Image (cartoon, rainbow, N blue to C red):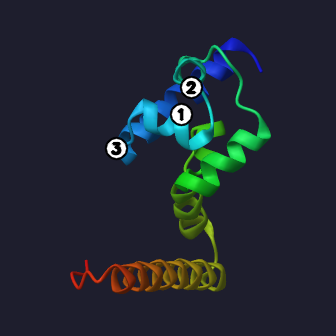
Amino acid sequence: MSETVNGEIGRRLRKVRLMLGIKVKDMAEGLGLTVGHYRKLERGEHSINASLLTMLHGKYGIDLNYLITGKAREEDLAKDLMCGNPEEMFFLLHRILNSCEEIHRDDVQEEDEDGDEEHC
């Protein structure tokens, strides 16, 4: 990867980490990296390999499409919704609602296991 691409990915990685409220030290530890190595990823001085991408997605739910291209899936879905025919729009909306239901179900289950009764 070129320095420019590494820099862009690093900036997006930092942005996502900050949005998630994770400290550099904690992110580095969670990925099995030294703090120095992780900081170099965010500065674009190191490339992010496939196994690290897999860990970022698996552990933190980071949208790899956004991380690599800067384009979020939501933008893709919005474009597909606006440009599709009614059947495609129905299909996409159905997928979105199913995903929301699945996420909510997982959140409720985690809260119940923790004994926390407060829901969204």
Residue type at tag 3: Gly
Residue 69 is situated, as x and y percent measured from the top left of the image, at: 64, 38
Label 2 Cα neighbours within 10 Å, binned few <14 / some 14-19 / many ≥20: many
Point out residue 68 in the picture as x, y percentages from the top left corner.
66, 38
As helix, strand or loop, the secondary structure at mark 2 comes to helix
Whether residues under marks 1 and 2 lie with C-beta atoms below 8 angstroms apart, the answer is yes
Taking 4 as reference, is 58 above or below it?
Answer: below
Q: Image point 58% across, 51% down: which residue?
A: 63
Q: Earlier in the sequence, mark 1 or mark 2?
A: 1
- Mark 3, mark 1: which one is toward the viewer? 1
Residue under numbered circle 2? 38
Task: Read off the residue under disc 3.
Answer: 21
Quarter of the rendering containing residue 3: top right
98 vs 5, left or right, is left
Report whether 55 appears left or right of 90. right
Identify the secondary structure beneath mark 3: loop
